[in-house]
Image (spheres, helix red, strand yellow):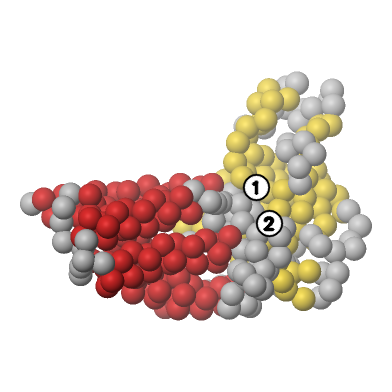
Amino acid sequence: MKSILLWLAAAALTVACFVFQNKTGPTYPLEGTVDTARGQVRFKFLRSEEIGTPLQLMLREPVPAGVTGQVRWRRYKSHDEWRTTAMEPGTFRFTRRGNAEELRGVGARLPSLPERAGKYEFYVDLDDGAAVRSVTGDRPIFARYKAPVPVFVLYPHILVVFFSMTLAVRTALAALTGGEVRRLLPATIVSLLLGAFALGPLVQKYAFGVWWSGFPYGYDWTDNKVVVELAAWLLAGAMLLLSRDLRRVRAAVVLALVVTLAVYFIPHSIFGSEYDYTRGAGHGTAG
């Protein structure tokens, strides 16, 4: 019974970490409200989309009478001039990981970028009759395009990463409660290698055209932080092999989980792969 409760606790913490990372990442849709002279306006702007699908940006109904919007946009890392597209009433379809949602409002659709890791930078300006202001002030919004990832690659990656994180938490709980870690620790390391360093690069290759965009080729925090995470777990594994003091092994396992949780608080996909239109090539550089 104790073991079952520990597994459930590990799974629950893993779900919480995944939800946090998903909603705080720079590719999650930007949603919120902004005050105008005619009332509050709710908005939803996509920040990630698949090649072949227009990028949808909308003000959700009800939009106060007298409020109009426009989008100022250009390709990021390009020599493009700024272009302006007026926002118009309509129905907008948002699809994310197979879930489709149709919403009515006032919005605009930017044409799909054909390049993997191609990005837009844009502002959404609202005119309430008294003033024209950007929803995000002086800060531009970025949206990145990716190619579709086959489900036979994406779903195993998600499942293995979820299982790996659950194993990591369960191993640390065993260490904290005086349980057995000798079998759980190697399994955690193997699952981390499979999820982050085998399936992960395969997903990235399909989506963005590169196998790896972390050090030394770029600054993608998603890639770099799993290296730190792996190092912490390998240290715990080395302690298991070299030390006869089980207390030190357990301390190393708990430390590895602390490092893992710390890197999960770093939003997903920061400084990820992006296409440099000024050079005509994709790079895993800061953006």
**Number of numbered discs:** 2
**Residue 40: % across, % down:** 65, 26
Circle 1: is it few (<14), some (14-19), or many (20+) Cα within 10 Å?
many
**Residue 260: % across, % down:** 41, 56
* Towards the viewer: 44 or 282: 282
* Towards the viewer: 257 or 132: 257
**In the drawing, what numbered circle is on residue 45?**
1
- Of the image marks 1 and 2, the number of the one nearer the N terminus: 1
Question: Element under label 2?
Answer: strand
Gap between marks 1 and 2 measured at Cα: 9 Å
Circle 2: is it few (<14), some (14-19), or many (20+) Cα within 10 Å?
many
Above or below, comparing residue 194 to residue 163 in the picture: below
Figure quadrant of residue 216: bottom right
**In the drawing, what numbered circle is on residue 227?**
none
Q: Given the image, on which type of amino acid does mark 1 rest?
A: Phe
Residue drawn where x is 38% and y is 69% of the image: 234
Residue drawn where x is 46% and y is 75% of the image: 197
Direction from residue 72 to residue 147 in the image, left or right? left
Disc 1 versus disc 2: nearer the observer: 2
**Residue 35: % across, % down:** 69, 25
Q: Given the image, on which type of amino acid does mark 2 rest?
A: Ala
**In the drawing, what numbered circle is on residue 143?**
2
Residue drawn where x is 42% and y is 78% of the image: 152
Residue drawn where x is 21% and y is 60% of the image: 246
* Towards the viewer: 64 or 245: 245
Residue 10 visible in the shown view: yes
**Residue 172: % across, % down:** 27, 55
Name the quarter where the C terminus is drawn: bottom right
Q: Are marks 1 and 2 in contact (CB under 8 Å)?
A: yes
